[in-house]
Amino acid sequence: MKKALTIGELLITMGIIGVIAMLTLPGFIQDYHKRVYTTKLKKSVEMIENAVNQACADNNVSYFYQTPYANAANSGKHQQDFIDKYFKKAGGINKNPFSDKYQILETGKLADNGLVTSHGWAKLAGGEALSFYCGRDSEYCIFRIDINSTDGPNIGGRDYFAIFVNKKTNELYDKYTSSNCGKNEDGYGCFAKLLENNWEMNY
């Protein structure tokens, strides 16, 4: 003959389940957010790669340095022109789409985002904030991407990254090594770390 659980036993069982859920749920939520961040970043990297290659094709050249968008002498307007032409922007957004400050992952300290008015920028249709800048006499251009614009967490290496493009090869890469990831507000080194770890955000 089966014996039913008493109310007391049921409450104890539910309490144990609740404790287990409290211990494991934060980890599940954090892992879920990390997967969302990496998925959005991958999409952004593909958009940047496509834009660089399309700009080369439209200008009948092989490499990005041969386009007007990578010419430091034409910085500012041409950098904004590149974003306006090759990225689908959100409508009605005229202000800087980045957060004023970003958190350093390792220390939790806040720092200015380092963007200046000469950078081209836009809020994209997918909700991302994108900036583009080519330094004078530099072998690369830099894209900064916040995968969810001013929405949190606004942490370098979580939702805010720096992606570099080699102007003479069109390769997207990280100028900084993975050991730099988490040490700065710009997310330097975190793109390298993600590539090394096959797009797994295990930091």
Image (cartoon, rainbow, N blue to C red):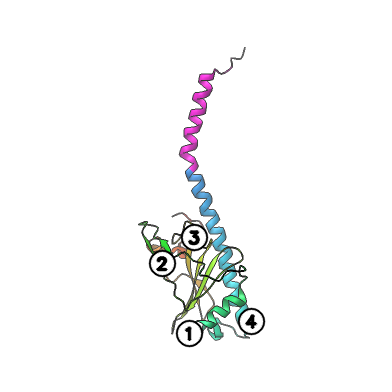
Q: CA distance from mark 1 to mark 2?
A: 25 Å
Query: Which residue is painted at 46% across and 76% down in the image?
Result: 117
Which is more toward the observer, 11 or 96?
Answer: 96
Residue for badge 4: 57
Q: Amino acid at mark 4?
A: Ala
Tag 3–tag 4 contact (CB < 8 Å): no
Chain part drawn in magenta = 3-25
Which element carries disc 1, helix, strand or loop? helix
Measuring from the top left, give residue 2's x and y in whole percent. 61, 14
Q: Is residue 104 left or right of residue 146?
A: left
Which element carries disc 2, helix, strand or loop? loop
Q: State which tag comes first along the sequence, 3 or 2.
A: 3
Q: CA distance from mark 3 to mark 4?
A: 30 Å
Measuring from the top left, give residue 145's x and y in whole percent. 51, 67
Q: Amino acid at mark 1?
A: Ala
Which is more toward the observer, 192 or 144?
Answer: 144
Q: State which tag comes first along the sequence, 1 or 4.
A: 4
Q: State which tag comes first along the sequence, 3 or 4.
A: 4
Which is more toward the observer, 93 or 29?
Answer: 93
Q: State which tag comes first along the sequence, 1 or 2.
A: 1
Q: Amino acid at mark 3?
A: Asp
Q: CA distance from mark 2 to mark 4?
A: 31 Å
Residue for badge 2: 177
Residue for badge 1: 72
Which numbered marker is on residue 159? Answer: 3
Q: Is residue 75 above or below residue 172?
A: below
